[in-house]
Amino acid sequence: MSRSRQNKLLTRLVSAENWVTAAALADHLGVTPRSVRTYVAALNARVADGVVVESGAQGYRAGPAARAALREDAVEPGTPRARLHQLVRRLLESESPVDVHDTADEIYVSSATVEGDLARVRSFISGSGLTLKRQGSQVWFQGTEMAHRRVLSRLVHDQTEMKSLDFPALMRVLGEGSVGAEAYSRFKADLVDALGGLGYFVNEYAIADVLMHVAIAADRVARGRPLATGTVHPRDDSVAVGGVLDELAIRHFGVRFNDGDREFLTTVVLSRIAAPRLQSVQTVARQRVDPKVTEAVLDACNAASAEFLIDLSGEDFTWRLILHVQNLLERVQESAWSRNPLTRTLKASYPMIFEVAVYIATRLQERLGIPLVDEEIAYIAMHVGARLERNRTDDSPPTATIVCPGYHDLDSLLRSSLDRSLGRTIQVVGVETRADPDWASLDTDLILTTIPPPVSSDRIVPIPLFLTDSDVERVHAAAMRIRRIRRLARLRTELEKYFAPGAFVRDLDPVAGEEAIIRRLGALLVAEGVIEDDYVERSVEREQMSSTAFTEALAVPHALSMTATRTAIAVGMADQPIPWGESRVQVVVMVAFSESDRAAFQTVFEQLVEVFSEHDSVQRLVHKGTDLPRFLDELVAVIDG
């Protein structure tokens, strides 16, 4: 039984934070629902006194012991991956070369097995600055202390399935004698308080990686392996932060950092989690911003504003993004990316915002030469999302009529109660106080009635005279349903215009790879006269920048530029899930947008992702959409609910 698939199943449930059907899990893993049941039973057997996976009529969800099970079993004992980690730790900790034959005897494998593992070690440390040296049967790492630490942090990240720091994994990597997790928890609380006192906002999403670097530094210093001496003249904003790190390290770990460690950790703090809050701190931070960064960020924001018809101006927004990119440049110099636990959520829930972030990242990469991974792009998306949220103008809320027969001023009291509880969710445009209203004349989106209606309808929501929390939730749910129907109705109108008759295939090869599938669907659009070959090339480049698998079932490859002669969509489906980035999809929708349809981009893009975010809808489309007319019929049926 594959423990890696068990872990993948559990990771999916933890990230979902809700019920997931057996069929959806089976598709995600590429197995049968029966295998899913077997994996769930094995997972629950891992923790004797806890529930790892809960089962119910709605499927499965992560139980209270789910994260503990992942932490304890992130690396399956005895596997090549476990031996790789064991070998790397030995080589990092040893003061002298490690003997291949002795190591084989100690871990109960053959020397040939260890030789094979050493090849994986070379691959694992690639790009870290360490090299694996050998003389006879003796092997050792050669490189700087900083290179050793890069491999240690890589080892920590590789031992956890989660997107945040796993302290038990960290303790396993650092080995016996390292400081316990409780000390780091106290260190973290004191660090956040101290940074706040110095005038900084703290990025809690990235603080786990900072604590990992602190833990590694404290452990290596305690072992007599500090970093080389730092610069003679530290930056002005580094002195105060360095002093805080010194004081907290002595208090919590009993170690004193030298100039090299203090400078490195101060840079980590300032480039990852500390954003200036007070004006005095901002002034110092502005002094270290490279003018090239300012110019590149402003250019990227202006271009994105024009391309997506949005407003990305404003001193507050651009300054924060400029400082973020400046910090990013400093992280790039150390090949140290900031992890972002919200990456998958941002991509799936806000695909348009993420797309704008990818566009900005592409411009920054061209201007500054910095490669960007998804998690760094997600931080740019958070900046963009915050800016757009401040300027967001929602569609007008659903209109509502209250039906409440007159008695004293109860109808006024009910309207006031609804305004207080749901003022931004619905717009009450009338109150009918007759006991026999003309129901047919009530043409608002919703009718909220205290008396029984003559017929049932999705528009009609019975409510009592005096609202409870559950009544407010029912009205809110009805309003959200109306808004979703509106959005999807717009999508239905748009999509019917855009599907290319000759660009529909049912037989995508699950093992062909993303690029081959993009080229196949792109060729169909080229044949339709919609795009040129260069659009296909740019779509491949966009995919390499960041995966376009926006949900667990759908990928939407496209180019960032809107150069199609008309907007058109090519659809490809596969009976078996296709590995796509870190996801497994069954539907690939290649979209080619034209300049004239720029305003439709957001509607089509976001709401197409919304339709394919529901597993049952995807399966319905995959199984019943045998050709384009049937696919469109099923798509309309799904949209109409």
Image (tube, rainbow, N blue to C red):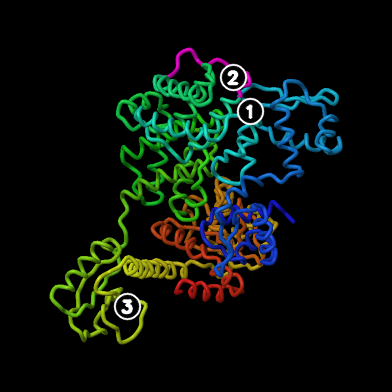
Task: Find numbered disc 2 in the image and state the secondary structure of the residue it sits on.
Answer: loop
Amino acid marked by disc 3: Ile
Measure how far apart labels 2 and 1 are at the Cα level.
17 Å
The total number of labels drawn is 3
The residue type indicated by label 2 comes to Pro
Q: Label 1 amino acid?
A: Gly
Q: In this rendering, would 267 be left or right of 32?
A: left
Q: Which residues are the magenta region?
A: 220-235
- Nearest-to-viewer mark from 1 and 3: 1
Q: In whole angstroms, how far apart are the C-alphas of marks 3 and 2?
A: 70 Å
Instruction: Give the percent coordinates (x, y) of residue 275.
Output: 39, 33
Mark before the other along the chain sequence, 2 or 1: 1
Q: Which comes sooner in the sequence, label 3 or label 2?
A: 2
Residue 403 location, x and y as percent?
A: 23, 78
Pick the residue in front: 67 or 124.
Answer: 67
Residue 226 part of the magenta-drawn span = yes
Which residue is depicted at the point 69% across and 67% down?
Answer: 34
Q: Which mark is residue 460?
A: 3
Q: Where residue 189 appears, x then y in whole percent?
A: 44, 34
Residue 177: mark in rendering: 1
Say which of 199 and 637 sits in front.
199
Question: Closer to us: mark 3 or mark 2?
Answer: 2
The one nearer the camera, 491 or 404, is 404
Asked if the magenta segment contains residue 366, the reply would be: no
Q: Bin the neighbour count of mark 2 within 10 Å (Cα to Cα): few under 14, some 14-19, many 20 and up.
A: some
Question: Which disc is residue 226 wearing?
Answer: 2
